[in-house]
Amino acid sequence: MVSEEYRQKNGFTPEQIANTMERFYDRVDVATQKTLDALAHDGFKLHCQKGCCACCRDDLTVTQGEAALIRNKCGDVLNEIPHKKGACAFLDESGACRIYAVRPYICRTHGLPLRWTDEDENGDDCEERDICDLNRHIDLVALMREQCWTLGLPELQLSQMNRITFGNDERVSLRALFNNLN
């Protein structure tokens, strides 16, 4: 595997990769809490709570750095049987996440109101917004910027970490991390 050879050649240990990812997740968690606090301040409540796994699908992928963190911290889970196909492989039978402490970036931000900049038909920048179907009760237009998770910079940082550490932007299926694929 080219990326593993690159990582070894450049001297990144699994522990260094895990520490880098954990620091990144710490920053994401602080920022997502600010977004949640801003929503709560104006009485907006997200449906997403502990036990909600409606968005935990089987087709999710992570960066190689995120996969390395999961391998480094959750080896015991990787030896278990993955959840049935269709839902995230890391769910347990009750729908709870077995790797919640090191859950990927997408899982940390999913459900939040999202905002990003795109181009309209005239080539002008315009703001787009979206939210999980379970949270459609929230009027996206009424939200202030700080009540939305802004896409762009965190994803760029993840991509850069992957290129520096592994030499590419390849992603890994969460299910593929299991040692006992069914």
Image (cartoon, rainbow, N blue to C red):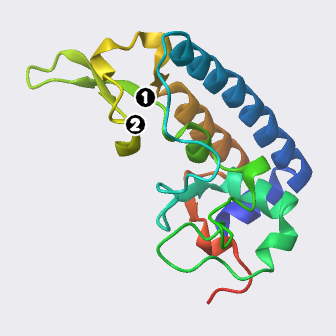
How far across and down, in percent of the image, does residue 102 sit?
Answer: 76, 49
Res. 76 image quadrant = bottom right
Measured in 3D between alpha carbons, the distance from the residue under mark 2 to the one under mark 1, in whole angstroms, is: 8 Å
User: Mark 2 Cα within 10 Å, few/some/many (few <14, many 20+)?
Assistant: some
Q: Which mark is residue 90?
A: none
Q: Quadrant of the N terminus?
A: bottom right
Res. 6 image quadrant = bottom right
Name the residue rendered at 71%, 83% in the picture: 81
Location of residue 21 with respect to 31 vertically, above or below: below
Location of residue 136 with respect to 67 vertically, above or below: above
In the picture provided, is 10 more to the left or to the right than 104? right
> Nearest the camera: 127 or 51?
51
Q: Quadrant of the C terminus?
A: bottom right
- Indicate which disc, 2 or 1, sits on the residue closer to the N terminus: 1
Q: Which residue is mark 1?
A: 113
| Secondary-structure class at tag 1 | loop
Q: Are marks 2 and 1 in contact (CB under 8 Å)?
A: yes
Q: Which mark is residue 135?
A: 2
> Nearest the camera: 157 or 81?
81
> Nearest the camera: 28 or 143?
143
Residue that sits furthest to the front in the current view: 43
Name the residue rendered at 66%, 66% in the picture: 90
In the picture provided, is 83 more to the left or to the right than 81? left
Location of residue 97 with respect to 114 vertically, above or below: below
User: Mark 1 Cα within 10 Å, few/some/many (few <14, many 20+)?
Assistant: many
Res. 95 image quadrant = bottom right
In the picture provided, is 92 more to the left or to the right than 7? left
> Nearest the camera: 10 or 138?
138
